[in-house]
């Protein structure tokens, strides 16, 4: 199947073709017709499957072929609202709106935290058809009366599971209360926890169900391995691996913001150009780090789980779990940053004795045992005893922990049924490759590098 067979308007198909795409991915094959039909949708899709284009292309079709609406002030009214959990993901999604909609007359903008609100107010006064927002800054505008949501006819909750993890449920409910009752609702989530089921039950009306891959599975294109190591030798081992194998564009995950800062500083002292990205960094610092990492002038980007949402780099070769995540599902999200669009990638986990239970949880979730490889010169002490990660973080020591375990309970029922029967994946979607946008014949367009240019950069919002 090709994009020409999905019923999309010619200006959108032209933009897709100009970006080099010809064959839709499985999520796109199913989601595009469902969204075009106008009904609600509940979609289970991991990162890297092309879900953004799966909802963006049909939304742009519906907006561009429907009548333009004006608000009470006479400006173009907002007809589509897309909520995302992080600034980086919001910028990426809005970038896709501009790329795929460049031959239409539609106007879009992004709003998130860390930058001034006044430029956004100006954009809203001039009028936009589509808004991509993080919940915090959207509420800022709602409270100040600078945004009119009375004409919204399409609502998207992207990465809904992460929004709930980040505590946005109350904010989401406040937004829902201000939207028109009659609208199309699209909910995308990588996992179907009980919380997601409850949200879907209250939000969606007889939704179509799509799940393109078994939940909590890792891509076959990603090579995974574990390097056992003592906690105080992790940084030395990471430096050894990067230099020994001449790794570039290495995305490294730590458990905490402090751990990310400390590791980036230590790697820089080792002669490896590194920057950290997390919620405490200013928006300009986050944008700079992402931009340098994407254009390969920065060798290592050290990130926390939240900050990494939205990092989408074609053919990213290496992901390193410096600290294993507290929540097993986050392992799947982390390593999903590599091996995208059919390319190969490598995911390496540096595991000390303190993290054996976390590793067991991950292997249980993904239903496979990860191969272990001990690196000569970094053999772990067989007599070492596990220490509570929380206690170790309070002392701030132990070079291996990268910070302590946060008090973050595991998500309940992450593998639970969502209470509805889902349609099976479309068989043989024409060779489509998973990816951020329509990712078939080649890997997708280079991401925008964060909110620094174009309409996607007119933004601001609480970085909650």
Image (tube, rainbow, N blue to C red):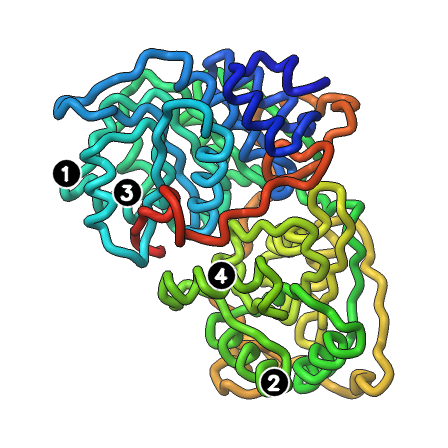
Q: Is residue 112 left or right of residue 232?
A: left
Within 10 Å of disc 2 (Cα), the crowding (few <14, some 14-19, many 20+) is some
Residue visible at 46% across and 40% down in the picture: 95
Residue visible at 53% across and 71% down in the picture: 405
Which comes before the other along the chain, label 3 or label 2?
Answer: 3
Which numbered disc covers residue 138? 3
Alpha carbons under labels 3 and 2: distance apart: 39 Å
Alpha carbons under labels 4 and 3: distance apart: 26 Å
Q: Position of residue 436 (x, y in %)?
A: 60, 40
Within 10 Å of disc 4 (Cα), the crowding (few <14, some 14-19, many 20+) is few
Dot in front, 3 or 2: 3
Which numbered disc covers residue 399? 2
Q: Position of residue 464 (x, y in %)?
A: 35, 55
Q: Is residue 417 visible?
A: no
Q: SS at mark 1? A: loop
Q: SS at mark 3? A: helix
Q: Which residue is mark 4?
A: 408
Q: Looking at the image, which is closer to me, 68 or 277? A: 68
Q: Is residue 172 left or right of residue 278?
A: left
């Amino acid at each position: 199947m090709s994009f020409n067979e999905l019923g999309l308007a010619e200006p959108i198909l032209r933009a897709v073709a100009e970006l080099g795409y010809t064959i839709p991915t499985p999520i796109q094959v199913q989601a595009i017709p469902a969204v075009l039909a106008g009904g609600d949708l509940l979609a289970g899709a991991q990162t890297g499957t092309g879900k953004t284009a799966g909802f963006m292309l049909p939304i742009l079709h519906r907006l561009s072929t429907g009548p333009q609406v004006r608000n009470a002030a006479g400006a173009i009214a907002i007809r589509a609202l897309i909520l995302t959990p992080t600034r980086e993901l919001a910028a990426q999604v809005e970038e896709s709106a501009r790329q795929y909609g460049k031959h239409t007359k539609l106007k879009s903008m992004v709003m998130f935290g860390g930058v001034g609100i006044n430029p956004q107010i100006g954009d809203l006064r001039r009028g936009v058809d589509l808004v991509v927002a993080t919940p915090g800054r959207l509420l800022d505008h709602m409270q100040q009366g600078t945004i009119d949501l009375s004409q919204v006819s399409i609502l998207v909750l992207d990465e809904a599971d992460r929004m709930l993890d980040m505590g946005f449920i109350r904010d989401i409910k406040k937004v829902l209360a201000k939207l028109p009752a009659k609208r199309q609702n699209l909910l995308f989530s990588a996992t179907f926890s009980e919380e997601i089921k409850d949200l879907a039950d209250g939000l969606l009306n007889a939704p179509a169900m799509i799940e393109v891959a078994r939940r909590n599975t890792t891509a076959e294109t990603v090579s995974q391995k574990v390097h056992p190591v003592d906690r105080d030798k992790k940084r030395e081992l990471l430096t050894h691996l990067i230099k020994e194998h001449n790794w570039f564009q290495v995305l490294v995950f730590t458990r905490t913001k402090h751990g990310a800062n400390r590791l980036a500083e230590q790697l820089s002292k080792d002669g490896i150009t590194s920057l950290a990205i997390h919620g405490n960094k200013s928006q300009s610092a986050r944008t700079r780090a992402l931009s340098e990492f994407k254009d390969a002038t920065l060798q290592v980007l050290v990130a926390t789980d939240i900050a990494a949402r939205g990092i989408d780099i074609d053919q990213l070769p290496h992901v390193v779990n410096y600290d294993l995540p507290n929540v097993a599902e986050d392992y799947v999200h982390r390593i999903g940053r590599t091996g995208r669009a059919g390319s190969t990638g490598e995911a390496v986990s540096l595991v000390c004795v303190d993290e054996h239970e976390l590793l067991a949880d991950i292997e249980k979730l993904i239903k496979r045992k990860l191969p272990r490889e001990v690196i000569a010169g970094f053999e772990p002490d067989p007599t070492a005893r596990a220490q509570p990660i929380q206690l170790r973080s309070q002392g701030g020591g132990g070079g291996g922990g990268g910070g302590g375990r946060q008090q973050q309970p595991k998500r309940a029922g992450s593998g639970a049924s969502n209470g509805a029967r889902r349609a099976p994946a479309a068989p043989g979607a024409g060779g489509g490759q998973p990816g951020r946008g329509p990712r078939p014949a080649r890997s997708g367009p280079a991401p925008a590098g964060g909110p620094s240019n174009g309409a996607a950069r007119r933004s601001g919002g609480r970085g909650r």
